[in-house]
Amino acid sequence: MNESKYVAPLQEGRIAISTNEAAFYLGRKPQTLRKWASLESGPLRPVRINGRLAWAVADIKRLLKEGE
């Protein structure tokens, strides 16, 4: 993954981000996040935008702060 195209998560201005971006910030593989969504088993719940998964930046920030 090209790290240079991603903004630091605490500086992110959007409300939701793609699965690939969320996986990068969380240090997981995109497929792990897709599994969380499919099984509704992960610490985050995605929303669907035009049939695609999107992950709330606020939830990612919260999860990152809990992990510190």
Image (tube, rainbow, N blue to C red):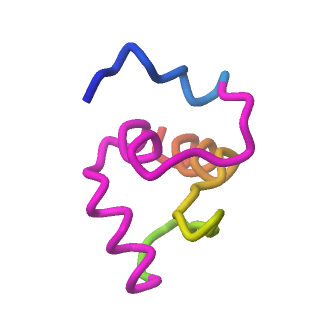
Q: Position of residue 7 (x, y in %)?
A: 54, 20
Q: How many marks?
A: 0
Magenta stretch secondary structure, dominant: helix
**Above or below 13: residue 49:** below
**Above or below 4: residue 51:** below
Q: Is residue 38 magenta?
A: yes
Part of the protein shown in magenta: 12-40
Q: Position of residue 38 (x, y in %)?
A: 40, 82
**Above or below 58: residue 44:** below
Quarter of the figure with residue 51:
bottom right
* Residue at left offset 58%, top offset 55%: 55
Quarter of the figure with the N terminus: top left
Q: Is residue 59 left or right of residue 32?
A: right
Q: Is residue 61 left or right of residue 22?
A: right
Q: Is residue 45 magenta?
A: no
* Residue at left offset 52%, top offset 63%: 53
Q: Position of residue 23 (x, y in %)?
A: 37, 47
* Residue at left offset 29%, top offset 22%: 2
* Residue at left offset 36%, top offset 38%: 24
Viewer-side residue, 52 vs 38: 52
Q: Residue pushed farthest top?
A: 4
Q: Is residue 29 left or right of residue 20?
A: left
Q: Is residue 38 left or right of residue 60?
A: left
Q: Residue pushed farthest bottom?
A: 39
Q: Residue pushed farthest front?
A: 50
**Above or below 40: residue 32:** above
Q: Position of residue 28 (x, y in %)?
A: 29, 49
